[in-house]
Image (cartoon, rainbow, N blue to C red):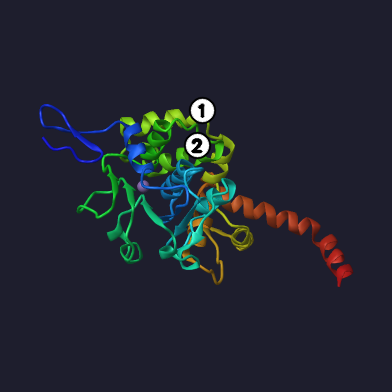
Amino acid sequence: MTTKIGVKHSKKGRTLFKSTRGRVRTLLKLFQSHSSVLVLISPDPDSMASALAVKRLLWKQVRGTSIAYIGEIQRLDNLAMMGLLKIPLVKIDETDPEGFSHRILVDSQPHHSEIFESFTYDAIIDHHPKVKEWDASYVDIRPKYGATATIMTEYLRGAGIKPSMKLATALFYAIKTDTANFARSGIDRDVKQFRYLFQYANMNFLKKIEKSEFEVKSLDYFQTALANRVITKKGIHSHLGKVPSADICVQVASFINRTKQMDSIQAEQVVEQQAEVFEEYKAYLIRIWDQKK
Ligand SMILES: [Mn+2]
């Protein structure tokens, strides 16, 4: 019977992994106190939270851990998460990945991006399907997990680390989004860690992150949409003019769609009432406008 690092075999020949504590020990053995570590991610809540957990795990074990992301962070909930939970991220072009003594890839595998493929890794921790054996000292890929954050929460617990409020909130939100509130691929292990994190996570921060749908600059489009609204028998129309992205139209439309349904007769009544009010105050309004000129 052969025994590989991190793996042991049961009597029936079925592969059993070492305890989480053993895994964490194996992972930590890769680093020394003078190590400088770079965690690479493709930014989303799961990868950001997992990277933060790696940083916590290596705290005091290495000289420093940085987190670098590829691509752009555009989703507003991701930006809110990064800001509120103070997740220190740098753009990959603003750092020198080769200048670190160690590199770790979390919530991704090298073939997910050409940039990822261009580096070697000391550790790869992920939950996406495993397409091949990766050449890294430590590989933990568990496709059955709904989120890498679940694996990382197990690691923290295995290492006897109680997560800070910010780390717990990040991991909690990561599991929530990657499992689409457990509708997608939530499994017992995800649920278990999610419940554990609940006691440390900050629900106000969570609400703020989840509700970060609009940017201040997009509020102007709501104003335009409401000011230009035309209520017809078919619904409400509004011309927004030039928009920076189609997202704005979707956001405005979904907001308008939340208006309690009115039928066209009711809508006409509203318009009629407004016209009556205007007629009533017409003389007064004209006087005011004239004064302003
Ligand atoms: Mn993920």
Q: Classify mark 1: residues with Cα within 10 Å, few (<14), some (14-19) or many (20+).
A: few
Q: Determine the secondary structure under disc 2.
A: helix
Tell me whether the residue at label 1 lies in contact with that at label 2, contact meaning CB atoms closer than 8 angstroms: yes
Left or right: 16, with 20 as reference point: left
In this view, the residue in front, 179 or 250, is 179
Looking at the picture, how far across and down is residue 23, in whole percent?
Answer: 32, 37
Residue at horizontal 43 percent and vertical 28 percent from the top: 195
On the question of residue 31 being in view, the answer is yes
In the rendered image, the vertical position of residue 187 relative to residue 31, given as above or below: above
Residue at 23%, 50% in the rendered image: 130
Q: Which mark is residue 199?
A: 1
Question: Is residue 183 in view from this perspective?
Answer: no
What residue is at 74 percent from the left and 58 percent from the top? 278
CA gap between label 1 and label 2 equals 9 Å
- Residue 63 image offset from top left, x and y in percent: 50, 50
Q: Amino acid at mark 1?
A: Gln
Q: Quadrant of the N terminus?
A: top left
> Could you tell me which residue is drawn at 47 percent across and 43 percent down?
61
Q: Earlier in the sequence, mark 1 or mark 2?
A: 2
Q: Amino acid at mark 2?
A: Ala
Nearer to me, 224 or 123: 123
| Residue that badge 2 annotates | 168
Residue 34 place in picture, x, y as percent: 47, 51
